[in-house]
Amino acid sequence: MCYVVSEAQKHAPTTAKRRRSIAMVTHRPGENVANVVSFNEGYPLKEGSDVSLDIGGTKLDLFTKGDSAWARTAELDKTIVAAMAKGTQIIVKGTPQKGPPTTDTYSLGGFPQVLAMIDKACDIKR
C-alpha cells in the first residue's frame, strides 16, 4: 500500500471541538486499486450528509460515513486526484452531527511530486 496524507492548514470555525482533519490518497496495487481519495473530518458527520470539495473551482460531492468522506466511484476518485495535481488548494465543507458546518483548507503545494513518488513506489501508471 502507498499513500499520501495531508493535514488541513486552516479550520473554520476555530471554536469547533474536533480532532485534526486529514486528506489521503491511497493506492492498493495488491487489490488493483489506485487513487482512493478520503477525508477524515475529525468529528462525526451528519448521517446522510455530503462533504463538498472545491479544488480550483472544480466542485464535487463525497458521500459520508462516520467521520470520513469518499468519492462514490473510482472515476470520481481519478477526477479528484487529477484536479488536486493541477490545483493549489482544496476547500472542504462538512456538516457535523452537532454544531455548525465546518470549512477546512488544504494546501496542494508539492502534491504532484508526492503523488509521483507513491505512483512509482506502487507501480501506478498515469
Image (cartoon, grey):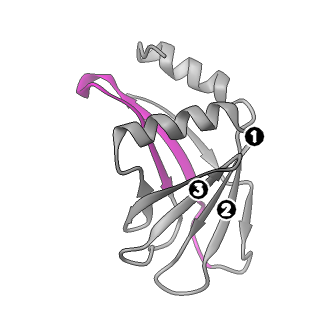
The range drawn in magenta is 17-39
Q: For mark 1, what is the residue?
A: 88
Give the spatial CA distance, label 1 vs label 3. 13 Å
Q: Is residue 27 magenta?
A: yes
Question: In the rendering, at what x and y percent does residue 11 appear?
Answer: 71, 66
State which tag comes first along the sequence, 1 or 2: 1
Q: Residue at x 39, y 37 (%)?
A: 75
Q: For mark 3, what is the residue?
A: 53
- Secondary structure mostly seen in the magenta stretch: strand
Residue kind at label 3, given as amino acid type: Leu
Element at badge 2?
strand
Image marks 1 and 3: residues in contact by CB distance under 8 Å: no
Question: In the rendering, at what x and y percent does residue 7 appear?
Answer: 64, 50
Q: Is residue 29 magenta?
A: yes
Category of crowding for the residue at label 2, using alpha-carbon neighbours closer than 10 angstroms: few (below 14), some (14–19), many (at least 20)? many
Give the spatial CA distance, label 2 vs label 3. 10 Å
Q: For mark 2, what is the residue?
A: 104
| 3 with respect to 19 (left or right) | left
Image marks 2 and 3: residues in contact by CB distance under 8 Å: no
